[in-house]
Amino acid sequence: MTVGFDLDLTLIDTRAATRAALRTADLDPAAAIDVDACLVSGAALRAEFGRRLPPEQVAPALRRFAAAFREDGLPLVRPLPGAAALLDRVRRAGRRSVVVTARRAESAASCLRAAGMAVDAIAGGLAGPDKSSAIRAHGVTVYLGDHPLDMAAAVAAGVPGIGVLTGIGTAGDLRLAGARLVLGTLAEMPAKWVG
């Protein structure tokens, strides 16, 4: 049995890290950038920058942001409530844990290290329903995420999706997208889904 996880706002809280990186990257409209929108995926970050900056400034701004995130953001990455304990429960049950995320795999690994957590595998650069192929390939039997698109990915992969209210989605949105169960935090994860 393999338990699959989204990363941002499911296992880790990167909001403070993102805000710090936006400040350090010295973007004029940083105060107006929607941090939560930027957490959905790299594509969302690019789109948000595209709305706020002239086209020729988007790529350089993204590079400055990435460097600032590595330098100033990573120390601010924190595990979300129950995340570390749930990964430990999965490990003690003899199960595997895999992160399937829109974040690049190297960045995801750095964020997990900064939060003091480790998983067995990371599939990066996948957003929304595109996550379903990695969910299947890694033999994930249940997938946890904070966004309705995470639930859509679980449905597309043919596995139960469990929504968690630590990020973007509301309980209604997560259920509408196919969540089998909705939790307030990962600390509420029922034993039957862990193994």
Image (cartoon, helix red, strand yellow):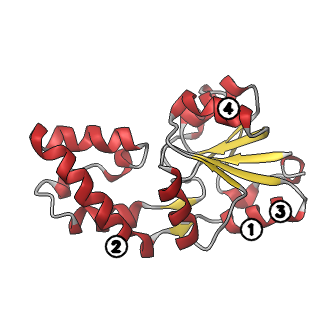
Q: Which residue is mark 4?
A: 154
Viewer-nearest of labels 1 and 2?
A: 2
Q: Earlier in the sequence, mark 4 or mark 1?
A: 1
Dot 1: few (<14), some (14–19), or many (≥20) neighbours within 10 Å? some
Q: Label 1, secondary structure: give it.
A: helix
Q: Amino acid at mark 1?
A: Ala
Reading the image, the residue beneath label 1 is: 85
Identify the residue shown where x is 32% and y is 59%. Answer: 66
- Say which amino acid is labelled 4: Ala
Q: CA distance from mark 1 to mark 2?
A: 27 Å
Secondary structure category for the residue under label 2: helix
Regarding residue 163, the answer to whether it shows in the image is no
Q: Quadrant of residue 178?
A: top right
In primary-sequence order, the first of circles 3 and 4 is: 3
Q: CA distance from mark 4 to mark 1?
A: 23 Å
Residue drawn at the location 63% of the way across and 65% of the way down: 81
Point out residue 31 in the picture as x, y percentages from the top left corner: 19, 58
Relative to residue 51, is residue 88 depicted above or below?
below
Q: Check contact, mark 3 vs mark 4: CB within 8 A.
A: no
Taking depth in this image into account, of 35 and 65 the one nearest to the observer is 65
Q: Earlier in the sequence, mark 3 or mark 2?
A: 2
Question: Considering only order in the chain, which callout, 2 or 4, is on the residue closer to the N terminus?
Answer: 2
Q: How far from the left and from the top, in percent, is residue 4? A: 71, 46
Q: Quadrant of the N terminus?
A: top right
User: Is 42 in front, or is 191?
Assistant: 42
Three-letter amino acid code of the residue under disc 3: Arg
Say which residue label 3 marks.
91
Q: Position of residue 100 (x, y in %)?
A: 61, 44
Q: Quadrant of residue 52?
A: top left
Residue hosting label 2: 71
